[in-house]
Structures are given as structure tokens and as C-alpha cells.
Amino acid sequence: MLSKGKRFLFGRGIYSTPEIEVAALYAARFTHEDKNYMIVIQNRVNPETLIQIPKDQNGIGEYWVSPSEADIRPYGICIKEV
């Protein structure tokens, strides 16, 4: 929920990325039946309102900032054993 956000380095909004490697840096981790997993949410974003932050501005990878909750739609869950 956008109203609960605390850090907005590149502006207020919902942060996502087209790069799974970048998303993995922020992935939630959990254990199930003695195996460790990471999980990320796959989203659709409104390209008309999207603010792109390139890797050369943050040193990690490309970020996408969606200014409104209405501009982003979760539609998939990606789970990886680690």
C-alpha cells in the first residue's frame, strides 16, 4: 500500500523493475519443509505514467516508479528455491 511507504529515493510511488535479478535483491524469503525459497511478485504497469530510473542513476539496475496504486497490477508469483 503506497500510504505505508517510508523510503522514496526517486520520488513517491510503487517501485518495481523489469529485471528479475534486481527484484531478487528485495525478495521475501521463507522456509517450507526445511527448504529455503525467495518470492517476488510479477506486475503489470501503466507505461503512460511510469517513471524509469536507469541503472546509471542507482548503480543496481533499472527501477520503475508507478506514481499511483491504480497504475500497477500484480498478476504472478515467482518462487525460487535458494
Image (spheres, rainbow, N blue to C red):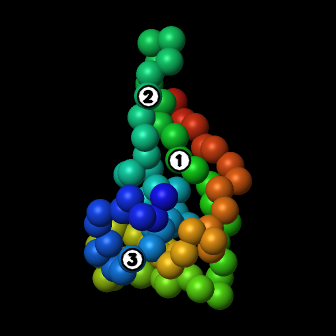
Q: Secondary structure at mark 1?
A: strand
For mark 1, what is the residue?
40
For mark 2, what is the residue?
30
Q: Is residue 59 left or right of residue 34?
A: left
Mark 3 surroundings: few (<14), some (14-19) or many (≥20) residues within 10 A: some
The answer to whether any part of residue 2 appears in the image is yes
Q: Is residue 25 left or right of residue 15?
A: left
Q: Quadrant of the C terminus?
A: top left
Are the residues flagged by discs 3 and 2 in contact, CB closer than 8 Å?
no
Residue at mark 3 to residue at mark 2: CA–CA distance = 28 Å
Disc 1 or 2, which lies upstream in sequence?
A: 2
Residue at mark 1 to residue at mark 2: CA–CA distance = 12 Å
Q: Position of residue 39 (x, y in %)?
A: 52, 40
**Residue at x-position 40% and y-position 70%:** 61
- Name the amino acid type tagged 1: Val
Residue in the foreground of this view, choosing between 79 and 65: 65
Q: Secondary structure at mark 2?
A: strand
Mark 2 surroundings: few (<14), some (14-19) or many (≥20) residues within 10 A: few
The answer to whether any part of residue 62 appears in the image is no
For mark 3, what is the residue?
12
Residue at mark 1 to residue at mark 3: CA–CA distance = 21 Å
